[in-house]
Image: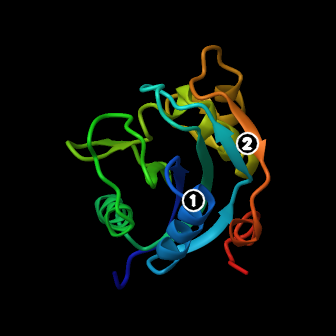
């Protein structure tokens, strides 16, 4: 989009099917084709939220810079999910890859397709822990800082740090792969 300023967005990525690490690394590779992946959080393993009878997830958060407006960014992340074989069988179903837009600058919006900030992010430890690793003082509109949100009771998706293998570890910390 010529002439559009770059925006900072935070994306939550999760996988609980197949080679979870490889799926996350592939998703980051594909996202990097459409936007700049500036930083990637450490990886966490987490219990599923919602539908519990499924494998544990690997989760991380990526900070990206993009010229895409929020609806176009949603289209881009959903295209990555589709190309990777994501199927939407039922809410909270197991999935190869899940990419959610958490925040897009200070934008607050609600459409049929997209709500910003993400409406459930403040209740999910598997989102807040990696987001806090990247930006603990970041303000979540209508909520407060990420650090404050992480202190809330009754967070879903208990997390534990996960040490990734070489392909995914190459992403963690910076947005460059390798």
First along the sequence among labels 2 and 1: 1
Using the image, tell me which numbered label, if any, was put on residue 45. Answer: none
**Looking at the rendering, which quadrant does residue 24 occupy?**
bottom right
140 or 24: nearer the viewer: 24
Whole-angstrom CA distance, mark 2 to mark 1, is 29 Å
Q: In this rendering, does residue 147 appear at all?
A: yes
Where residue 43 appears, x then y in whole percent?
70, 51
Instruction: Kindly identify the residue that appears in the image at 46 percent across and 27 percent down.
Output: 53
- Residue occupying the far top of the picture: 153
Q: Residues within 10 Å of mark 1 (few under 14, many from 20)?
A: few
- Residue 96 vs 55, above or below: the answer is below
Left or right: residue 152 versus residue 64 is right
Instruction: Kindly identify the residue that appears in the image at 32 percent across and 34 percent down.
Output: 91
- Residue occupying the far left of the picture: 112
Where residue 38 appears, x then y in whole percent?
64, 69
107 or 94: nearer the viewer: 94
Left or right: residue 3 versus residue 7 is left
32 or 72: nearer the viewer: 32
**Looking at the rendering, which quadrant does residue 119 occupy?**
top left
Q: Which corner quadrant holds the N terminus? A: bottom left
Q: Which corner quadrant holds the C terminus? A: bottom right
Which residue position holds label 1? Answer: 19
Foreground label between 2 and 1? 1
Where residue 54 appears, x then y in whole percent?
48, 34
Where residue 49 appears, x then y in whole percent?
50, 28
Q: In this rendering, does residue 6 appear at all?
A: no
Q: Under tag 2, what secondary structure?
A: loop
Q: Under tag 1, what secondary structure?
A: loop
Left or right: residue 22 versus residue 43 is left
Q: Confirm or deny contact between disc 2 and disc 1 (CB under 8 A).
A: no
Which residue position holds label 2? Answer: 136
Q: Residues within 10 Å of mark 2 (few under 14, many from 20)?
A: some
């Amino acid at each position: 989009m010529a002439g559009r300023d770059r925006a900072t967005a935070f994306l939550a990525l999760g996988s609980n099917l197949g080679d979870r690490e490889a799926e996350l690394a592939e998703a980051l590779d594909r996202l990097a084709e459409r936007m700049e992946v500036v930083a990637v959080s450490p990886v966490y393993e987490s219990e599923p939220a919602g539908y519990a009878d499924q494998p544990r997830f690997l989760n991380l958060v990526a900070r990206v810079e993009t010229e895409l407006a929020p609806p176009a960014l949603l289209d881009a992340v959903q295209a990555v999910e589709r190309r990777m074989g994501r199927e939407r069988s039922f809410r909270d179903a197991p999935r190869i890859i899940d990419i959610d837009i958490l925040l897009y600058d200070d934008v607050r919006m609600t459409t049929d397709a997209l709500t910003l900030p993400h409406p459930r992010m403040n209740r999910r430890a598997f989102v807040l822990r990696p987001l806090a690793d990247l930006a603990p003082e970041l303000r979540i509109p209508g909520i407060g800082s990420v650090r404050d949100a992480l202190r809330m009771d009754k967070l879903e998706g208990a997390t534990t740090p996960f040490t990734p293998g070489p392909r995914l570890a190459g992403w963690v910390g910076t947005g460059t792969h390798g």
